[in-house]
Image (spheres, rainbow, N blue to C red):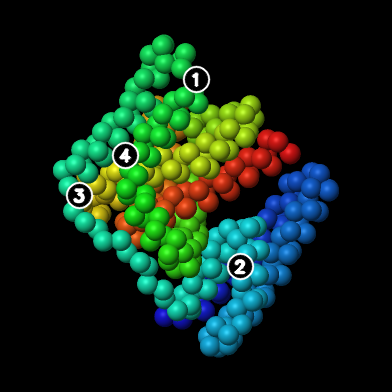
């Protein structure tokens, strides 16, 4: 896109169109006057910020670089309320900033020992998570023991990888953070676009995997939040990104295989109908974006951070839906 300001124009037009349609919907179909009024007020605010963003798009690019405050405020609001228009706003901000070079960790060819360790961990993960639960005796083992055993095993075997990546990550944190936030915003936008037709075909129902998480959250919210925000990013990024990358050297094949396997294993043993299998595309989209972010930096803490943000925001949403 030659004119970067077009990103602001697209964001503002999307914001106005989406909010106008929602206002019409609330007026015609929402019976509760209080609920309709509250939502209409929010959409009017969206239109206001969209108009401000459109006016900013008329300014010279150099002027916008010197004063980004209005664009930042509008983008934050539109991201929180409408998501996609806000993403375009952040894409503009990212496009006009000086490019920081991501510190790449040298992508060394894995040794036979590295390959063996990774194969062992992947097999261990599959057995613990998908094979043993099919046996009755496994039900007698407390879940916390299973989680801790898997976490500690992965930590010990991959420790040297974490140590090397963490040193580089902390040393270059000011470069990594903008990259993480930008990639997360792009990932979220793609996930929303993929999820819309899938949710429609499933009549608005969430995936069976998400239903299980919702049920766990209502019963043990703190434990479920810890598993979702800390345990899952660490374990899943280690297995699906770090360890699979030691076995598959080709970047494209790795990204696709890692992402699709990640998506399939989140659905394949929990689906209840044929439409539920469509959520493989949603989870695979997440996995592919995380795999690309990892491969573009060769630092596992980049994809872990993105995964952490995704699951933490989801936990916050579940808190509002089920606990407040």
Q: Earlier in the sequence, mark 2 or mark 3?
A: 2
Q: Earlier in the sequence, mark 4 or mark 1?
A: 1
Task: Tell me the quadrant of the picture where the N terminus can be found.
Answer: bottom left
- Tell me which residue sits at (35%, 38%) in the image: 156
Residue occupied by mark 4: 157
Residue occupied by mark 2: 75
Q: Earlier in the sequence, mark 4 or mark 3?
A: 3
Task: Tell me the quadrant of the picture where the C terminus can be found.
Answer: top right
Labelled disc at residue 142 = 1
Query: Where residue 13 sits: x, y (%)?
Result: 59, 69
Looking at the picture, does residue 226 appear above or below residue 274?
A: below
Query: Where residue 191 sits: x, y (%)?
Result: 47, 51
Q: Secondary structure at mark 1?
A: loop
Q: Secondary structure at mark 3?
A: loop
- Tell me which residue sits at (48%, 39%) in the image: 231
Q: Secondary structure at mark 4?
A: helix
Query: Where residue 32 sits: x, y (%)?
Result: 81, 44
- Depth check: 5 or 70 in front? 70
Labelled disc at residue 110 = 3
């Amino acid at each position: 896109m030659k004119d970067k300001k077009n990103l602001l124009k697209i964001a503002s037009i999307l914001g106005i169109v989406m909010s106008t349609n929602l206002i019409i919907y609330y007026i015609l179909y929402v019976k509760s006057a209080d609920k309709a009024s509250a939502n209409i007020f929010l959409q009017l605010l969206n239109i206001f910020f969209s108009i401000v963003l459109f006016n900013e798009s008329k300014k010279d690019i150099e002027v916008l670089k010197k004063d980004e405050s209005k664009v930042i405020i509008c983008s934050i609001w539109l991201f929180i309320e409408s998501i996609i228009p806000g993403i375009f706003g952040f894409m503009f901000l990212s496009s006009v900033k000086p490019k920081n070079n991501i510190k790449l960790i040298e992508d060394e060819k894995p040794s036979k020992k590295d390959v063996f360790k990774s194969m062992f961990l992947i097999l261990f993960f599959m057995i613990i998570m998908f094979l043993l639960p099919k046996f009755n005796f496994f039900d007698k083992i407390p879940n916390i023991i299973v989680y801790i055993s898997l976490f500690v095993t992965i930590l010990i075997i991959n420790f040297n990888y974490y140590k090397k990546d963490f040193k580089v990550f902390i040393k270059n944190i000011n470069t990594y953070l903008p990259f993480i936030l930008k990639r997360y915003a792009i990932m979220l936008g793609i996930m929303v676009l993929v999820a819309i037709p899938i949710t429609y075909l499933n009549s608005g129902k969430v995936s069976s995997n998400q239903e299980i998480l919702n049920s766990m959250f209502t019963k043990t919210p703190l434990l479920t939040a810890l598993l979702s925000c800390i345990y899952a990013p660490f374990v899943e990024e280690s297995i699906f990104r770090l360890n699979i990358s030691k076995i598959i050297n080709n970047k494209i094949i790795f990204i696709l295989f890692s992402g699709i396997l990640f998506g399939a294993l989140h659905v394949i043993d929990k689906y209840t109908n044929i439409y539920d299998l469509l959520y493989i595309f949603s989870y695979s989209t997440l996995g592919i974006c995380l795999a690309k972010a990892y491969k573009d930096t060769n630092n596992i803490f980049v994809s872990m951070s993105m995964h952490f943000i995704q699951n933490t925001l989801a936990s916050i949403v579940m808190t509002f839906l089920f606990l407040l």
